[in-house]
Amino acid sequence: MARNEGGRLVYADLLRAAAVFAVVVIHLAGSRMADVAAGSGAWTAFNVYNGISRWCVPVFVMLSGMFMLDPKRGLTLPRLVFHHILRILIALFFWGTVYHLAQLLMAGGKLSPQAVWDAFYSVVLGDTHYHLWFLYAIIGLYILTPVLRAFVRGRAALTRRAMETDFSAVILAAVPARLLVVTPVPRLTSERKMALSLGEHLRFCRAHGILSPHSVGTILSRRALEEEGYHLASTHFYTQVDRSPRGVETEVVPAGQYLSACHLGGFDTAEETYRRLLRSGAARGLTLGERFFEDVLLDELSSAGQQDYVLKISIQVM
């Protein structure tokens, strides 16, 4: 990435400058639209200018996320609180109070200690000038930053593992115990049923506040896969967690020897890797367990499409 002599990313600064200009265009066009007849040529032009500049605020949020969530960047909790959150809070409370007092004076009111306190308290409650909404939003995102950074670190580790994978290998190795949040899957006879069942699992996790850097995995019946094929073998979806969420039953997948292989490509072509794993187990004279575990190492968050997905398929050796 191109940096200037001060170490700043040139493209990020240019993008910020363009976004600042777009913010000015939004507000100028929006205010001028109210002064012209709706449907006129001028109104249409201002509406177009306003519409094509709406990308600017999301870009500010994404730029903040790019720097705040970078796993390579050290960000301690004191620095986050005092350098980032406190700085925004001071600007919000100061300017929010100033705007309230300015409106009071323009309306013929009088300045007093009580008026200053009322203005400040209104800002605390979120009742302030409309354009300051972004400061409330960015403070909320900063508060969530430690959780989001942990999530990104986990995703980055999974991505590195996937990029170092030998897709031709079938590996027998010791695997530590894992803790899973599991939901059952009905017999999946169509992609629609698969999507609905996956949606149920995701809603269950959201309802119980379960956040994990791991993608949703699938448990498949070995017997069903051998007899009926990959697409009819799924029995459960799962999300791996570090500790048991409160009020949620979890399943401990025991530590032990597992036979595993990685698959490059979408789910439509995964069955051959399962068959290769079974052939390898038979050739080694291994007794395999009844369940396959399918973990997604690279998914739509880390790849251009299903052809670049990386699945890790494993089964316990009894």
Image: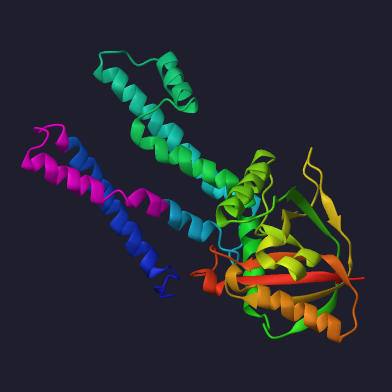
Q: Position of residue 125 (x, y in %)?
A: 49, 25
Location of residue 153 (image quadrant): bottom right
Please, which residue is most extreme toward the front here? 227
Left or right of 235? Residue 39 is left
**What secondary structure is the magenta-colored segment mainly?**
helix
Report if residue 36 lies within the magenta region.
yes
Chosen colour scheme: rainbow
Which residue shows up at 42% across the image and 25% down it?
127
Please, which residue is most extreme toward the right here? 318
Location of residue 149 (image quadrant): bottom right
Indicate the quadrant containing the C terminus: top left, top right, bottom left or bottom right. Answer: bottom right
Above or below, 261 against 194 in this view is below
Above or below, 293 against 135 in this view is below
Residue 103 seen: yes
Left or right of 181? Residue 109 is left
Indicate the quadrant containing the N terminus: top left, top right, bottom left or bottom right. Answer: bottom left
Above or below, 112 against 90 in this view is above
Report if residue 67 lies within the magenta region.
no
Which residue shows up at 60% across the image and 74% down it?
269
Left or right of 59? Residue 205 is right
> Total label count?
0
Residue 175 seen: no
Which residue shows up at 39% across the image and 73% down it?
4
Q: Nearer the viewer, residue 50 or 8?
A: 50
Which residue shows up at 74% across the image and 49% down it?
184
Q: Position of residue 226 (x, y in %)?
A: 76, 70
Q: Position of residue 72 (x, y in %)?
A: 59, 67
The span picked out in magenta is 32-60
